[in-house]
Amino acid sequence: MIDVKTAQDLVLKHSSVSSKILEVDLKDSLDFVLAEDVVSKIDMPPFRQSAMDGYALQISGAINYNVIGEIKAGDNNNPMLNIGEAVRIFTGAPVPDTANAVIMQEKVQVQGSKIITQMPLAMEMNIRPIGEQIKVGDIALTKGTAIKGAHIGFLAGLGVTKVAIYDKPSIAIVVTGNELKAPGNVLSFGEIYESNGAMLTAVLNELGYKKTSVIAVKDDYDSTKKTLKETIGNHDVVIISGGISVGDYDFVGKALNDIEVEEVFYKVKQKPGKPLFFGKKDTVSIFGLPGNPAAALSCFYIYVYPLLKKSEGALNTQLLSISLPLLTDYTAKGDRAQFLKARMHGAGVEILDGQSSAMVRAFGDANALVFLPEDCMQIRKGQKVKTILLPSK
C-alpha cells in the first residue's frame, strides 16, 4: 500500500499529452487546450482609438475650439485638424492623426459650433494607442491554455478563425456487479440501481469530456476479461467501477493481469478509496475505482482528473487547493489519510455529515474536499486545513 502523494505522482509520471492535434473553428474550441501558441497578426487596436464619447482636438493655448465634423465608430475618415480645431467623436472611433487629445463630453460646454473646455488638457489623453492591447507578432495565447469564453472573444477580436487544440481522450466507464440494475426497472430483493456510470458520465460531461461510454459487465471472469480487453482496445482511458477488491466475485484484478495490463499501483493508504488500482496497457490508462459511489467520486477528482487534464495538454493538472480554517472541531477515525466532503463558507470550511464511502448525497452540497494527512486525526475549530476546490461551471 502506498501513500497519497506517491500515488498522485505515479499517475502523472505514467501519463502523457495526447498526440492527437486537431484544427477546429474558434467557435468550437471552448474547453479545449491550445496545442500551439496563437500569434497576433494585427495590432489591437489597429488605429488610435477614442476611449470616450467627447471631442478629439488639436491642443491650443486657448479653451475655445471650433468643431469641424464628427467621427463615429466604424467611420474611416481622417480629417485634418489645425490648432484650435476639434471633431465630435464617439467611443471606439478612430482618432484623427492630427488630434492629440480627446476630452470627454461631460467636461465641455457646447456653444453652437464651438466648445469650451472645462478641464486641463494633456497630450494623448483618452486615446488608446495602436497596439495598446497587443502588437503584431506578439503571442496572444500560449500553448497549454485551456480555452474559455473570454479567450474566444479575445481571439475573435484579433481576426482568428481557427486554432490547433489537443483532442480530448475517449473514456469508457465499465460498471461491474450482478446486483446492479438500470434505473427505471423494478428492483428484486438484493438488487440496487446502478448510479456510478450515470454519475461519472455527468461529471465528465460537466468538465468538457463528451466522448464517454458506459459498459456494464456481470460478475463472472470470462465476461469481465472479454469486456475489458475490448474496451481497453478502443479507448484512451478506462475507468472501472467496482470489482477491484479481493472478494470471491471480484474478477477485475485477475482479468487485468491476464490481458497484460501493467499494474502501476494497487491500494492507497487513504479513506475513502483504499482499493484503488492504476495501470497501463500500451498508451491506455486504466483506473479501478471502488464501487461505493462517494469513494469512486473522490478517487476520480484526486487521481483521474489530473491524468485527464495532462492528457489534453493543460498546464495546470491538479485541482486548486487553499488553506482555510475549519469551522468546527473534527475527529477522524482510523490511521489513513482522508478526503472529506466539505463546503466553504466565507473564509472557512465546514466538514459535512454523511462521510461514508457509500453516501454520495453530501457531494451534492460539497464544493470542496478537506484533506487530512494520516498523522492528523484531531482538528480544532480555527485550525487551517488543506481544502481542495471542486470544479464548478
Image (cartoon, rainbow, N blue to C red):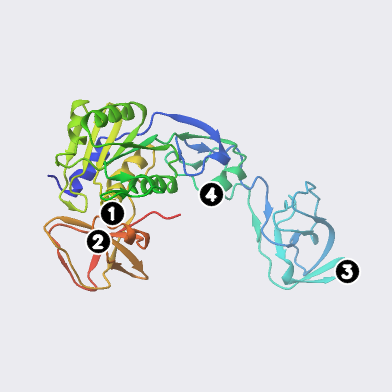
Instruction: Name above or below for residue 108 compared with residue 226.
Output: below
Q: Earlier in the sequence, mark 4 or mark 1?
A: 4
Instruction: Name above or below for residue 68 compared with residue 186.
Output: below
Q: Earlier in the sequence, mark 4 or mark 2?
A: 4
How far across and down, in percent of the image, does residue 199 sit? 37, 49
Amino acid type, mark 3? Gly
| Closer mark to the observer between disc 4 and disc 1 | 1
| Closer mark to the observer between disc 4 and disc 2 | 2
The residue labelled by disc 3 is: 112
In this view of the protein, which residue sits in the foreground, 182 or 10? Answer: 182
How far across and down, in percent of the image, does residue 284 sit? 30, 30
Q: Earlier in the sequence, mark 3 or mark 4?
A: 3
The residue labelled by disc 2 is: 355
The residue labelled by disc 1 is: 294
Q: Are marks 2 and 3 in contact (CB under 8 Å)?
A: no
Amino acid type, mark 4? Gly
Amino acid type, mark 2? Gln
Q: Earlier in the sequence, mark 1 or mark 2?
A: 1
Rendered residue at 26%/30% (across/down): 223
Circle 2: is it few (<14), some (14-19), or many (20+) Cα within 10 Å? many
Q: Are marks 1 and 2 in contact (CB under 8 Å)?
A: yes
In this view of the protein, which residue sits in the foreground, 65 or 113? Answer: 113
The residue labelled by disc 4 is: 149
Q: Tell me the CA gap for discs 1 and 2.
A: 8 Å
- As helix, strand or loop, the secondary structure at mark 4 comes to helix
